[in-house]
Image (cartoon, rainbow, N blue to C red):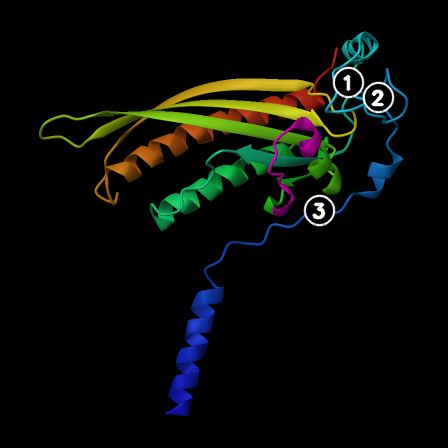
Amino acid sequence: MKTILLVIASLLLLSATGCGTPAVMTASRPPSYYEQTDLYSGTAGHDSLFSSDSELLSDEDVKRILGFHFNPQPLNRIAVMPMGQVRWFGWSDELDKAGTAVQMALIGRLKQSKSVYDASYLPTLLVPDKKSIGYLREAAARYQADLLLVYKASCMSYEKYKAFSPDKTKAYCNLEAILLDTRTGIVPFTILVNRTFTAEEQGSDMNFYETIRRAELKALESALTQVGDAVVEFLTGPQG
């Protein structure tokens, strides 16, 4: 009897540990990171362009900031921070996995750039309650991220019902993203992407609400892909 219980316990342990996704860990800085030359111009070293994030800028500060020419470093760590709903817990296991895959696809796209040695989502323990530029910079600095990519998606769904046919939905997603330079505090790159996607209720859907969420995910995936491509192009392309 004890032998049978041990076998059952072992099988349960294997099933519990064998279903997880691979761990995602922070990559160490390559030695060449510390050898790269300072490509920043218009400011002394890596000093912030803003004397304080809580004070109004003086005329001299405005002139200095507007005259600053941003050049990304040859190697960068990018931290990604989504705002708003980014996971779909409570709908279905399949939908939650699809949401995770959409997020990781953005990370994979950023890592394809030769200018990015590491890309990962900012740990939730570091995400500040107050989403001001000053607090975001501090969180990115603690993570030693050279750049912080912040995006926020807002989606609206429109259902269309037809007699004797599956319910249909159309998702409209608006995704806004900014790239924050941790050292200087400036935002050298922004992008706004609009996407629409239609979906029809499938027999595998738990309900029509899952169909709606699936359409939103498809629209979000397409928008994040364009954001990732645009950021990579910005980091590797000519900067004027």
Residue drawn at x 49%, y 23% as measured from the top left? 175
For the view shown, which residue lies furthest in the right direction? 44
Say which amino acid is labelled 1.
Phe
Left or right: residue 124 versus residue 3 is: right
Indicate the position of residue 151 as horizontal and vertical percent values: 55, 28
Check whether the beta carbons of the residues at disc 2 and disc 3 lie within 8 A of each other: no
Which mark is first along the chain, 3 or 2? 3
Q: Which residues are magenta?
A: 125-136
Check if mark 1's residue and mark 2's residue have beta carbons within 8 Å: yes
Find residue 65 and report its horizontal and vertical position in percent: 78, 13
Q: Amino acid at mark 2?
A: Tyr
Residue at point 79% right, 43% down? Answer: 30
Quarter that holds the N terminus? bottom left
> Looking at the picture, does residue 233 appear above or below residue 212?
above
Q: CA distance from mark 1 to mark 3?
A: 25 Å
The residue singled out by tag 1 in the image is 70
Residue identifier under label 2: 40
Q: Which residue is mark 3?
A: 27
Q: Nearer the viewer, residue 90 or 147?
A: 90
Q: Quadrant of residue 179?
A: top right
Upstream in sequence: badge 1 or badge 3: 3
Nearer the camera: disc 1 or disc 3? 1
Residue 42 in the image: state x and y as whole percent. 86, 15
- Quick check: can you spot residue 107? yes
